[in-house]
Amino acid sequence: MSFASGPAPEWIADLDLQAEVEESVAHSLIADDIVSFFTSFGLIDEADTAALLEPVVAALEMEGNSLLKPACDGIDNVNPYSPMCFHGSAWTNTYSQRMMGGDLLDGITLHNNDNLHVGDGFVSHFSSLESGCESLESGESCSIETVTISENLYIDDAEITYPGAQFVSAYEIKTKMTSRQQVQIGAGNTTAVSSYKKLDTQGTNCQEINEASIEWAYNTLSDKARYNYDTYGAKIVAGKDLRACFSGP
């Protein structure tokens, strides 16, 4: 069973030879032998493999995928910083919250601190506007500080129809964000106080974020993968926003 993962079927467990090394060590040794075998015949190039997988790894790092590192999922709203876990989702920091906040006046920027939590940890933590720029004087610069909570959702093994056919990335980054109204109030937009429905429930905020994720993935593809997608792929389209549970700050 050293070639495989997970619990062995009963009959294999009864008849198989006792492994001399741990499963993780066996996998590493087997992988090294396979690479050496194919390399000796000129059938594999490590540089080509790295180039092929680079966009995939970049996407997994962008979301904060649990196959690379677990979510920090601390007790507090804001996670601890550790090289052993993902503090937050880079996608939420770089795109989701900034796009949700809407257009800002010159001199005002938005800095977000996302925090990856799991299960009950996601439920019990909340987004917030930490500081705003309501008193910004003309010509000054200012940064709006926000905190968001994200949870990566993955396909459960029980939902898999064809083992090995599922994707390894999260199918959703569930995120508690600071509303556009709240960000705009923090930016000194006095009309935002009475504009919650217009700013947060009647637009295409979430659709635009999803479209940005499709565009990011497309631009990150290798030239060959992009050609195959353009030529043969089923095109991914972001659906319109549906009325959901608009709650929180």
Image (cartoon, helix red, strand yellow):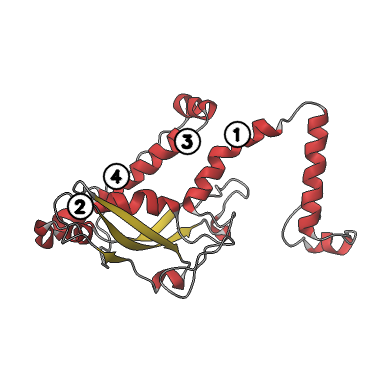
Q: Nearer the viewer, residue 70 or 134?
A: 134
User: Do the CB atoms of the residues marked 4 and 1 lie less than 8 Å apart?
Assistant: no
Name the residue located 89 percent from the left edge and 62 percent from the top edge.
18
Residue 6: % across, % down: 72, 60
Identify the residue under disc 1.
52
How far apart marks 4 and 2 lie (CA) works out to 30 Å
Identify the residue under disc 2.
140
Quadrant of the rendering where the C terminus is positioned: bottom left
**Residue 161: which numbered mark, if any?**
none
| Mark whose residue sits in front, 3 or 4 | 3
> What SS does tag 4 mark?
helix
Identify the residue under disc 4.
208
Inspect the image, locate mark 2, and give the three-letter code of the amino acid beneath it.
Glu
Quadrant of the rendering where the N terminus is positioned: bottom right
Q: Nearer the viewer, residue 80 or 30?
A: 80
Mark 3 or mark 4, earlier in chain: 4
Identify the residue under disc 3.
220
Inspect the image, locate mark 1, and give the three-letter code of the amino acid beneath it.
Leu
Mark 3 or mark 1, earlier in chain: 1
Q: Is residue 140 above or below residue 113?
A: above
